[in-house]
Image (cartoon, rainbow, N blue to C red):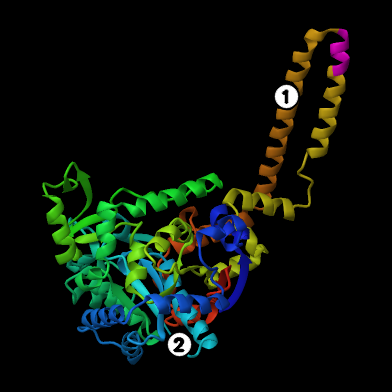
Amino acid sequence: MQLNKLPLSDTQSFSSFFLDYIQQKDTLKSFYNRFPIVENFKAQLADKSDSFTSAHRKTLVDTLFKQYKNLEVSESVKKNISSLSSTKTFTITTGHQLNIFTGPLYFIYKIVTVINACKELKKVYPEYEFVPVYWMASEDHDYEEIKYFRLYGQKYVWQTDQKGAVGRFSPKAIESLIKEIPGEIKFFKDAYLKNNSLSASVRQYVNALFSQEGLLVVDADDRDLKMNFRAVIENDLFDHSAKQLVDSSTSQLETLGYHPQVHAREINFFYLEEGLRSRIEKKGDEFIVVDTSLRFSKDQIIKMIHEEPEKFSPNVMLRPLYQETILPNLAYVGGPAEVIYWLQFKSMFDHFKVPFPLLMPRNFALVMDGPALRKFKKTKLHLVDIFKEKNSLCTDWVHQNTTHDLSLESAKATLAQTFVELKARAVDIDSTLEKLVSAESKKTANSLEKIERKLLKAEKRLHADKLRQIETLKDSLFPGGSPQERIDNFLNFYQQDPQFIQKLIDSFDPFDFRFNVLSYND
């Protein structure tokens, strides 16, 4: 597999907010602790060592062994779980929703990034152990976002009327969908049909794909883990520190011209039980669960926090803090949207005395199979060209490959100057003629524009075959106009090449923040 790289800015796929972070602009430096370069992990190791207790480590290890007890695991996984007891072991974490069949390609890219980051850090800091972690968003209730995936251009949808946290859904109804999917998917079939919850199913198939790399899957929907988060739950319900601090950071970012994506609520927890995940709000002297008849007094809610913390599920604002509270984590690997919304949270982390992790962008990539690569070579495009909007791509290609002069810019300039002179002469004779000359000037300019468009259209007809190849290539790499990594499933490549994931591991550099273009040999 051949690898080429492009600056992220050349892909026209990222916001200026995210690119400013990547380029370490001074305007954003106060919103994070350290930029994710290998040398900066030395200080991060010291910070996390000082703050993460042995008691927290024991809870984490016990929880992981409990969650993995019914799963056949590799020696690497067993070793990594046990090693978390040591004060010399730390994690690199990524998180994602429980999309069926892994969802889009970038789910795989996230995990490959954390695996490779741990390997690189081990080379530089051999006295420490670094464990890759996938944090399941098992408490999310966004069923609509996880219920489908696309394979070979077809959309497959899981239909269920279950409610509440998706990690608690029964996956049995996926059986009918499994029968429709082409190719070998035994590890998915086993995972979905042999488990009683979606989170257990996801753990099993992720383990099947990555256990040899020692990847750990964490399900934070757990009573014991939330026992270590009770102080934050109580603070959020009664003191609302998170809202005050995040609102302040959000305001500062807006003043700098950025557009933050998430906004804090006064209470940033959901009430969680079987079939229900709904927001908690304060109404008068009571705490209510939105869209239900559930209501609690102050004393009842305090009792619940201390005795049943598993009933409190953090929203997008507090999930990062929860993660960093229960893991000995050094860095979080996320996509562009995740990285920039974490920038709103540093002051909140500081308040709760939890080290703010290094924010690592995941690896970004596009994969060309053999047919796509052949089309790319035939069209003689440059890599940067394929990121252009389809019409602009075709138009630019025609201008670069025509033997004719399709531009009327010189004629436009000449006529514009002629009308300037005509207007001066006309006004000198009669000032009322100015509008007439201006109108005729506009009409002539429009005519030239029309002629220019006709010339381009005629030239495109002469290159119709080549332009069809370009459009087909563009559609295959950007299905529906969106980046391949956000639409296609990894099975598109894995079913033809069982070494696909290993090739990604061999190709990606987690600390090289450029766009990867991978191509199979023609």
Query: Do we see residue 268 in this rendering?
Result: yes
Which residues, given as a range, are shown in magenta? 424-429
Camera-side mark, 2 or 1: 2
Q: Position of residue 92 (x, y in %)?
A: 43, 76
Question: Residue at 47% of width from left, 79% of height from top?
Answer: 46
Question: For mark 2, does the 10 Å Cα neighbourhood hold few (<14), some (14 to 19), or many (20 or more) residues?
Answer: some
Judged from the image, the secondary structure of the residue bearing numbered disc 1 is helix
**What amino acid does circle 2 point to?**
Tyr
Of the residues under marks 2 and 1, which one precedes in the sequence?
2
* In magenta stretch: residue 97: no
The quadrant of the rendering that contains the C terminus is bottom right
Q: In the picture shown, does residue 357 fall above or below 455?
A: below
Q: Position of residue 431 (x, y in %)?
A: 81, 9
Q: In the picture shown, does residue 409 fall above or below 192?
A: above
| Front residue of this view, candidates 122 and 462 | 122
Horizontal side of 352 relative to 37 (left or right) equals left
Horizontal side of 90 relative to 33 (left or right) equals left
Q: Which residue is labeled 1 in the image?
A: 442
The quadrant of the rendering that contains the N terminus is bottom right
Q: In the picture shown, does residue 266 fall above or below 514?
A: above
* In magenta stretch: residue 425: yes
Q: Position of residue 438 (x, y in %)?
A: 76, 19
Horizontal side of 284 relative to 324 (left or right) equals left
Q: Quadrant of residue 205?
A: bottom left
Please tell me whether the stretch drawn in magenta is mainly helix, strand or loop. Answer: helix
Q: Which residue is labeled 2 in the image?
A: 128
Judged from the image, the secondary structure of the residue bearing numbered disc 2 is loop
Query: Do we see residue 157 in this rendering?
Result: no
Cα distance between the residues tagged 2 and 1: 72 Å
Q: Position of residue 37 (x, y in %)?
A: 56, 74
